[in-house]
Image: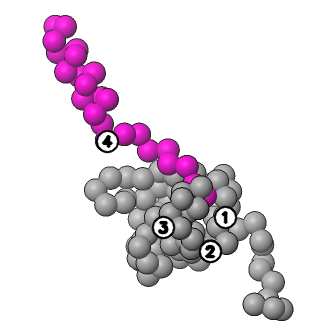
């Protein structure tokens, strides 16, 4: 909007970031996630949707049936297509545990 200047153009509300990057289906879900205290930014528990994120922050939260850990790579300007959204973060979460399970089964075979 003309005449409106952001307090800091290098930050974005966490609920907008989650929605713009398609990590949550709606902005309301993103707000509820943040308000419920189920979201961490750089290890700090967040209890408000208007907490700011910036490039380099690590976000940790429950996503479906697993814990998702992502690093903010860029701040999106809109809620665009999925490939554009994925370019704004890097997922740091390891796989579903199949590698660990494979190692454990191999160790039991060697015993």
Q: Position of residue 2 (x, y in %)?
A: 81, 91
- At mark 3, the secondary structure is loop
| Res. 75 mark | 1
Where is 101 relative to 107, above or below?
A: below
Which mark sits nearer the N-terminus, 4 or 2?
2
**Which one is in front, 50 or 63?**
63
Callout 2 crowding tier (Cα within 10 Å): few <14, some 14–19, many ≥20: few
Q: CA distance from mark 3 to mark 2?
A: 11 Å
Q: Residue at x 62, y 74 (%)?
A: 78
**Image check: 105 left or right of 95?**
left
Q: Is residue 17 above or below residue 70?
A: below
Question: CB of mark 2 within 8 Å of CB of mark 1?
Answer: no
Tell me where residue 12 sits by quadrant. bottom right
Instruction: Tell me which numbered mark, 4 or 3, is placed earlier along the sequence.
Output: 3
Residue under label 2, please give it: 78
Q: What label does residue 58 carry, if any?
A: none
Q: Which residue is mark 4?
A: 96
Magenta-tinted stretch: 88-111
Callout 1 secondary element: loop
**What is the quadrant of residue 16 in the picture?**
bottom right
Determine whether label 3 and label 2 are within 8 Å by CB.
no
Residue under circle 3? 22
Left-right relation of 53 to 33: right
Residue 36 image position (x, y, % from top left): 40, 73
């Amino acid at each position: 909007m003309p005449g409106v200047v952001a307090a800091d153009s290098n930050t974005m509300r966490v609920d907008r970031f989650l929605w713009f990057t398609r990590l949550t289906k709606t902005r309301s879900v993103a707000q509820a996630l943040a308000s419920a205290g189920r979201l961490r930014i750089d290890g700090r528990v967040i209890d408000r949707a208007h907490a700011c994120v910036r490039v380099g922050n690590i976000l940790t939260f429950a996503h479906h049936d697993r814990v998702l850990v992502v690093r903010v790579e860029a701040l999106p300007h809109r809620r665009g297509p999925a490939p554009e959204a994925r370019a704004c973060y890097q997922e740091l979460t390891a796989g579903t545990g199949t590698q660990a399970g494979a190692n454990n089964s191999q160790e039991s075979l060697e015993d």
